[in-house]
Amino acid sequence: MPKITPPTLAALATLDIEVEVLRELAHTPLGERALFGVRGGRFEGPRLQGNVLSWGGDSVIRTGGGSRINVRLLLETDDGVPLQLQYEGRASQRDGQPHIEISGSFEAPRGAYAWLNDILVFGLGAQTAGGVRYELFHFSRN
């Protein structure tokens, strides 16, 4: 059997997203749903910098135990390359503190950012006045 070495986490970027509530859907079979539109934002990391474009959406289902998050974002790097980031996650309260945890993946064209197609993204988030901030990571294998 091959030996699998546990990976470490490498910093990918800080992602700031500004959102606005588009619609609330009460009393659905899955819980209370809120739909958010993306107004914009910014991402900054060692190999990745750019803007969050005002396209995309955030669907949140709230239940008694927390919230489920499903998001698609259109990003554009500072050198003009479009990227799509899709992620899911959970938001909950633990010990009276909010916790947001996500995992997702990128779609990138051939070229300088094609390496993003081969990684899984993990993030920890916090609400901000106008949206959410995530610290994003990916596995690093030596």
Image (cartoon, grey):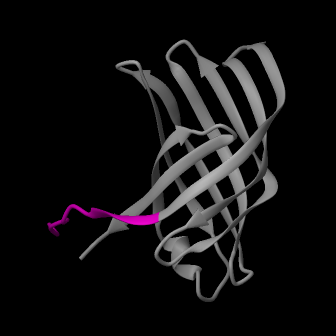
Residue at horizontal 71%, vertical 56%? 73
Total label count?
0
Q: Give the range drawn in magenta.
A: 1-12
Residue 65 location, x and y as percent? 49, 16
Quarter of the image for the N terminus: give it. bottom left
Image x and y of residue 54, in percent: 82, 56
Q: In this view, does 132 lie to the left or right of 2?
A: right
Figure quadrant of the C terminus: bottom left
User: Could you tell me which residue is drawn at 57 percent across and 26 percent down?
Assistant: 67
Res. 80 image quadrant? bottom right
Decide: is 28 above or below 108. Answer: above
Residue 117 x %, y %: 55, 72
Which residue lies at the image location 70% right of the left edge and 40% below the top edge?
130
In this image, 90 relative to 49: left or right?
A: left
Identify which residue is drawn at 50% across, 70% down. 45
Lateral position of residue 27 relative to residue 30, left or right: right
